Image (tube, grey):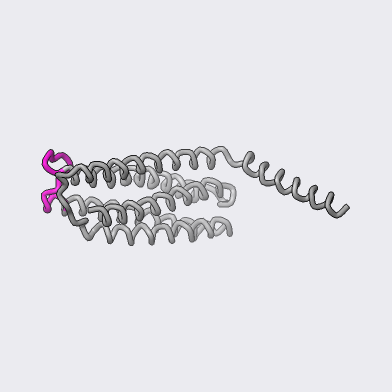
Amino acid sequence: MEKERENMEEQLKITRESKGILNMHPQKFAMWLFMLTVLMIFAAYTSAYIVRKGQGSWIPFDLPVTFLYSTGIIVLSSIFMQIGYFEAKKNNKGKVILFTVLTLLSGIAFLVMQFKGYGRLVDMNLYFSDPNNVSGSFIYVITGVHAAHLISALVFLIIVLITAFKVENIKDKLVRMEICTTYWHFLGGLWIYLYLFLQLNQ
């Protein structure tokens, strides 16, 4: 009897887990698929980087210190984003707006530091298109594509912010806030990986 009860509990557990996966919000599922695609793109970029570097005629470079500053900024922005999500779960509209704005400003500051970093690369004679030094091209492409995705996240943040101003019960839009938070953390983690990758593979 005890064994049958344990078997039934195990089957119920499996059923609940399966149901949870099948009942995933369509927008969440779409976001996870999109992030997987982005991850594959950058895996291809970094793999091509390593292969090309191994072929020789590769001029070493130093990453601009502004890229380090932007790394700190994006970590801070993820903290703001997570706090905003926690406040959304508490239905604290005022703080959701505050921390969403802080995240938005941090994201803009990140892009500004990236732009300044490009200026520093030019000062070091590293250009986007230089047949004599392809290492520069890889830096621009990898960081530039990441910046483009971050801009898309900023647009998402603006939509979340506008929604927060419009609705009374912020919990009604919690799914959107959760998706935005997940995407933002993903881009932050991706940047940290890219920065370390470039730093260690100069």
Pinpoint residue 39: horizontal percent, then vertical percent: 40, 43
* Residue 107 left/right relative to 94: left
Q: Is residue 198 above or below residue 148?
A: below
Q: Residue at x 45, y 50 (%)?
A: 161
Q: Main secondary structure of the magenta part?
A: loop
Over which residues does the magenta segment extend?
Answer: 121-133
* Outermost residue to the front: 55
Q: Looking at the rendering, which quadrant does residue 90 occupy?
A: bottom right
* Residue 132 left/right relative to 101: left
* Residue 1 left/right relative to 126: right
Pinpoint residue 1: horizontal percent, then vertical percent: 88, 52
Q: Looking at the rendering, which quadrant does residue 66 occupy?
A: bottom left
Q: Residue at x 31, y 45 (%)?
A: 46
Q: Looking at the rendering, which quadrant does residue 26 occupy?
A: top right
* Outermost residue to the right: 1
Pinpoint residue 147: horizontal percent, then vertical percent: 31, 46
User: Total number of numbered labels?
Assistant: 0
Q: Residue at x 46, y 56 (%)?
A: 97
Could you say which is closer to the camera, residue 123 or residue 200? 200
Q: Residue at x 16, y 46 (%)?
A: 58
Residue 157 in magenta?
A: no
Pinpoint residue 56: horizontal percent, then vertical percent: 17, 44
Residue 123 in magenta?
A: yes
* Residue 16 left/right relative to 170: right
